[in-house]
Image (spheres, rainbow, N blue to C red):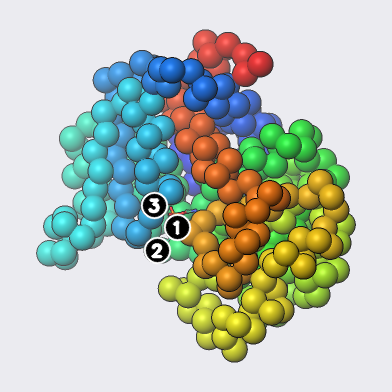
């Protein structure tokens, strides 16, 4: 069995073996994307609820596509049009959904720990699609998959994560996953966004952008999370761009084979220049494509799917 838990709540709680196992299955599903028929009937008769309490484009649609490509039945829940508006609690709402005999709940919520809270009270599987500033495990896995696609084994590879680390669930999931796989992780951004205490997670903190990127194999450029108060931690977008923005000048200082990720949505010309976001070094849409494969792999494995039944990714 690749996954030890009934739930996927974060990469902190997953072993390197589990992460490698999920990615192996994701690469096999990725191979299906190039076929004329991209659906497989392995989740027929199973029901997944997408329980989103925060805005999302990539994660919500990627989960929905993953579920559809596995032939699952899908229900999309929107907090804005639910009895949440009448004061029903998160737990009561989730227990009502579970009483309708669902097999899996995918939750995005602004509160850290909300996915774990529901996983503890529900019998069905829970997948964390982002809980506040805590973790975003499927984003972490798709980022790692995109790095492995180009670099293979990540042991000893130098990954620099740049930006608003303090508010970032993506950064946390990347740090847990990448360090477990043996990568050397550097964090970079203004001191107000990159607390030195993060070194306790086994990473290097570097406040000078040029030094942080000089030896990097990969840059993972994070969004400035204005909705979580990040705008108060630096003087303005122009200053941020001048000090920490990834511009063509920064790209010219990278190793020739280094490449650039961004989880989206992007603030163009703040954390990343538009010309870099559209340029030859970025792999942003590869990340998006890999996201569907990662989510298919997790849903398949949590449903008791047999990894051996999928054949090889080659
Ligand atoms: N990367 C990511 O989580 O994007 P969305 O907020 O659009 O889902």
Q: CA distance from mark 3 to mark 1?
A: 16 Å
- Where in the figure is residue 267, as x and y percent of width and height? 52, 67
- Residue 226, percent across and down? 48, 75
Q: How many discs mark residues in the rendered view?
A: 3
Which residue bears the numbered disc 2? 110
The label nearer to you, 3 versus 2, is: 3
Residue at x 58% of width, y 41% of height: 286
Q: Which residue is mark 3?
A: 57
Q: Does ligand 1 reach within 8 Å of label 3's beta carbon?
A: yes
Asked if disc 1 and disc 2 are in contact, CB closer than 8 Å, the reply is yes
Whole-angstrom CA distance, mark 3 to mark 2, is 15 Å
How many angstroms separate mark 1 from mark 2 (CA)? 5 Å
Q: Which mark is residue 131?
A: 1
> Which element is circle 2 on?
loop
Answer with mark 3 or mark 1, whichever residue precedes in sequence.
3
Q: Name which residue lies at 58% across and 11% down.
A: 311
Percent position of residue 73, x then y: 26, 28
Q: Quadrant of ligand 1?
A: bottom left
Q: Is the residue marked 1 within 8 Å of ligand 1, measured from its CB?
A: no
Seen from the viewer's position, the closer of residues 305 and 214 is: 214
Which part of the image, by quadrant, shows the N terminus? top right
């Amino acid at each position: 069995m690749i996954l030890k838990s009934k739930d996927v709540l974060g990469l902190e709680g997953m072993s390197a073996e589990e992460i490698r196992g999920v990615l192996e299955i994701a690469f096999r599903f990725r191979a299906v994307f190039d076929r004329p028929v991209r659906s497989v009937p392995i989740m027929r008769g199973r029901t997944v609820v997408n329980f989103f309490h925060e805005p999302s484009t990539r994660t919500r649609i990627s989960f929905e596509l993953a579920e559809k490509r596995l032939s699952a039945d899908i229900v999309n829940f929107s907090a804005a049009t639910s009895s949440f508006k009448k004061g029903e609690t998160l737990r009561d709402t989730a227990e009502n959904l579970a009483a309708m005999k669902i097999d899996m709940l995918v939750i995005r919520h602004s509160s850290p720990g909300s996915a774990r809270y529901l996983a503890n009270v529900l019998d069905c599987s829970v997948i964390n699609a982002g809980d506040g500033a805590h973790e975003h495990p499927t984003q972490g896995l798709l980022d790692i998959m995109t790095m492995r696609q180009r670099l293979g084994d990540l042991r000893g590879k130098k990954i620099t994560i740049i930006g608003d680390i303090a508010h970032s669930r993506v950064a946390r999931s990347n740090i847990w996953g990448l360090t477990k796989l043996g990568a050397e992780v550097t964090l970079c951004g203004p001191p107000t966004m990159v607390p030195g205490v993060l070194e306790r997670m086994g990473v290097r903190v570097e406040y000078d952008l040029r030094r942080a990127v000089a030896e990097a194999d990969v840059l993972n450029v994070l969004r400035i999370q204005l909705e979580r108060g990040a705008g108060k931690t630096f003087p303005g977008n122009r200053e941020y761009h001048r000090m920490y923005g990834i511009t063509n000048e920064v790209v010219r200082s990278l190793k020739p084979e280094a490449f650039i990720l961004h989880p989206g949505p992007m603030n163009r010309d703040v954390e990343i220049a538009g010309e870099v976001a559209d340029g030859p070094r970025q792999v942003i849409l590869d990340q998006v494509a890999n996201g569907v494969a990662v989510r298919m792999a997790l849903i398949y494995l949590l449903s008791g799917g047999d990894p051996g039944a999928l054949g090889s990714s080659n």
